[in-house]
Amino acid sequence: MNSASETPTRQRDPRVLLIVPAYNEARSLPRLIEQIRSLHPSYEVAVINDGSSDDTAQVVGQLPVRLISLPCNLGIGGAMQTGFCVAREEGFDVAVQVDGDGQHPVEQIHLLVDGLLRSGCDIVIGSRFLTGTGFQSTISRRLGIRIFSVWLSAICHTRITDATSGFRALNRHAIELLSRNYAEDYPEVEAILVAHRAGLRIAEVPVQMSARTEGVSSIGKVRSIGYMVKVSLSLLMSLIRRPNVAS
């Protein structure tokens, strides 16, 4: 008979929080939440209503998820940082960003979570370019993504192919860091640099994304140019600033 010290113990499953930033996504959210609940019933879901002017708050209020409504539109950075703060304060092991527009494949969330747990990395990014299949955005956006990815790969000494992908999973170290230091606008690129400078490990896993199910992107052709300039300047400023140290 085995002694108590010899009895194997079962490691508990990680607590996972799916953070869904949403701005005017009332039409796409019911189907998204239905898919999440069907495929990932053990994961908790927090929808961050980012000052929507449509019926997002009312629609989400009828769904089996947590609703956090911001008093005004803060942008994707403010919405995600709110979610990271919830994950930090409530002790979640893993946080996953899932956009509310239907582009991030719910059925592939497990690839991010499994990749995070198996690799020992702090952040795992879902890349649409590792396989070259699925929706890959417009030619102009792919060019911008390529430029940012080359820069970050060189800076971080890690292969980055999809620098602007918001479909990513974070462990507790990354949650702690980014809950306190996250760019306000278009933060995905800068977050990679912030994490690298804090000594966190970053990896990618292949995913197949979809075109958004409803509405239109907030970044049109004209704003794409401004996006490129703004993110480039943000990267330069991040390189100049004193690096953070992950706790």
Image (tube, grey):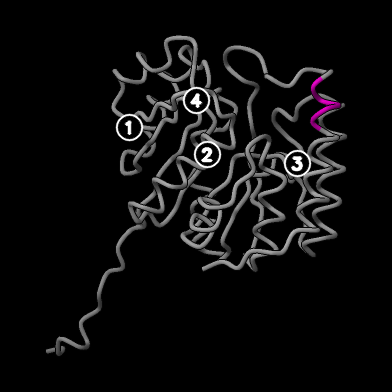
Q: Which residue is mark 2?
A: 80
Query: Which residue does the numbered mark 3 point to in the structure image?
Result: 129
Classed neighbour count for the residue bearing mark 2: other residues with Cα under 10 Å, few (<14), some (14–19), many (≥20): many
Q: Is mark 3 in CB contact (under 8 Å) with mark 2?
A: no
* The quarter of the displayed image where residue 129 is located: top right
- Residue at mark 1 to residue at mark 4: CA–CA distance: 14 Å
Q: Amino acid at mark 3?
A: Phe
Depth check: give the residue in front, 93 or 126. 93
* 110 or 194: nearer the viewer: 194
Prevailing secondary structure of the magenta residues = helix
Left or right: residue 93 versus residue 156 is: left
Q: Nearer the viewer, residue 204 or 92?
A: 92
Q: Earlier in the sequence, mark 1 or mark 2?
A: 1
Disc number placed over residue 66 in the picture, else none: 1
- Cα–Cα gap, marks 4 and 3: 29 Å
Residue holding disc 4: 50
Q: Earlier in the sequence, mark 4 or mark 3?
A: 4
Mark 2 or mark 4: name the one nearer the start of the chain: 4
| Foreground label between 4 and 3 | 4
78 vs 71, left or right, is right
Element marked by disc 4 = loop
Q: SS for tag 2?
A: helix
Look at the picture and state if 245 lies above or below 48: below
Quote the CA–CA distance across marks 1 and 2: 14 Å
Circle 3/circle 1 CB separation < 8 Å: no
Question: Where does the magenta region start and end?
Answer: 223-227
Residue 36: give x, y in percent of width and height.
40, 32
